[in-house]
Amino acid sequence: MSPAERTVAVIVVAAGSGVRLGHQLPKAFVHLAGQTLLERAVSTLAGISEPVQVVVVAPAGREESAHAIARSALGASASPVTIVTGGVTRHESVIEGLSALESGITTVLVHDAARCLTPVEVFDRVIADVRRTGHGVVPGVRVSDAIKVVSGDLLEGGTLMSTIERDTMLAVQTPQGFPRKALEAAYAAAESVAYTDDAGVFSGAGMVVHTCPGDERSLKITTPADLARAQALVLGVDGSRVRVGTATDTHAFAESRGLRLAGLDWPDEFALAGHSDGDAVAHAIVDALLIAAGLGDIGGMVGVDDPKYAGASGEVFVREAVRRLAESGFTPVNVTAQIVGNRPRLAGRRAEAERVLSSWVGAPVTLSATTTDGLGLTGEGRGISVVATALVELFAPTSN
Ligand code: CTP
Ligand code: MG
């Protein structure tokens, strides 16, 4: 679809700093179960029933990283990404987003990156309703608590003044959709920046906003408790925070002596062939850690044929994998590896190897070894296979 044919844009406002979340990163760059809020918000847009212009409003200084995240989140989708720098308030950020719209856009949706779990059906519904009615459209959900007006301090000894009829209340969410020209006019006319959402700006300018069904998953991640709630939603009802990964690595023996295995030197044993140091235990551990966290494998991580990794120590790969896990919010719990081969004899050096590997992983690594009754390449003494299992856990969502 060419720019002239594309008529819908989604502005994802992601420029806030997330003061109430209290994380060291801006909120849109904080991880939720292994993916940033921005990545989750944008990847949903790839599922909208037509290509849309995606405008990401990013915090100053993070435009490039926002672009990389958004592009990869959209995958093979035909939707183009435009990045703009945000303003001091959400209101100003939306104005920046509006300034970047392609000329053919006639329908604009504004969406909070903080509502990164909104399902794609809501986007399709809002787009359809804006087109059908020619008015603004805001998704919302019913309120289940009783709502009171309070005078004085809300929580500390305030006085109840009145009850608001709950059946007239709607908790509104995003994406909020509008005819483009009307939304631009409403923002141009908005005198104050005190509006907290786009529907407020639009109806403040005297224009009609209709409602449509929102979704419970569209919760706005504001506080650490919200992040924990979102994490439980993503991981399923039990909110399991642990993941397991299994991987194998096999190397043939080389002609020369000087083996590196399980983080140790074995000078009298035949070396393992390989571009790096050939430490099959380290490599299997790397793959098990990465796959447990859903981060691919060692080839995707470092490009194993890369000249800069010629002869590289297994330690480099293991530490890099652990660093990538941490970036995605995961920490290793424990790792096991089983060496399958006739040689070397692990028994005398098991504790030493476990100490070294544990220090690289930052969690207990335990090792075993076995033979295969003379069968296969390991049994015939032509090489070594390693099977590794890693258990990883998501950080507590409040940690930095
Ligand atoms: N937002 C923005 N630019 C701003 C402020 C907010 O783009 N100057 C975006 C946020 O990134 C978020 C959405 O508007 O996706 C809703 O704002 P909110 O949840 O309040 O996020 P923050 O302002 O980042 O959080 P806090 O108010 O706790 O600092
Ligand atoms: Mg805010």
Image: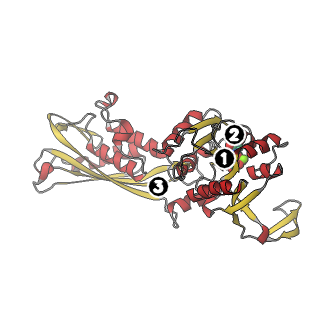
The answer to whether the residues at label 2 and label 3 have Cβ atoms under 8 Å apart is no
N-term mark: 3 or 1: 1
The response on whether ligand 1 sits within 8 Å of label 2 is no
Between residues 338 and 37, which one lies in front from this camera angle? 37
**What type is the residue that disc 3 sits on?**
Glu
Q: Can you give x and y, in whole percent of width and height, for residue 177 in the image?
A: 68, 52
Q: Which secondary structure, mark 3?
A: strand
* Camera-side mark, 3 or 1: 1
State the residue at coordinates (64%, 56%).
126
In contact (CB < 8 Å): disc 2 and disc 1: yes
> Is 52 rendered above or below residue 140?
above
The label on residue 393 is 3
Vertical relation: 226 (above or below) 36: below
**x, y (%) of residue 199?**
75, 52
- Most foreground residue, 371 or 117: 117
Looking at the image, is 42 positioned above or below residue 158? above
Q: Name the residue type under label 1.
A: Val
Which numbered disc, 2 or 3, marks the residue that appears first in the sequence?
2
Q: Position of residue 368 (x, y in %)?
A: 26, 54
Residue 182 visible at all: yes
The answer to whether mark 3 is within 8 Å of ligand 1 is no
What residue is disc 2 on?
98
Query: Which residue is labeled 1 in the image?
Result: 108
> Could you tell me which residue is drawn at 20 percent across and 36 percent down?
273
**Crowding near pointer 2: few (<14 within 10 Å), some, many (20+)?**
many
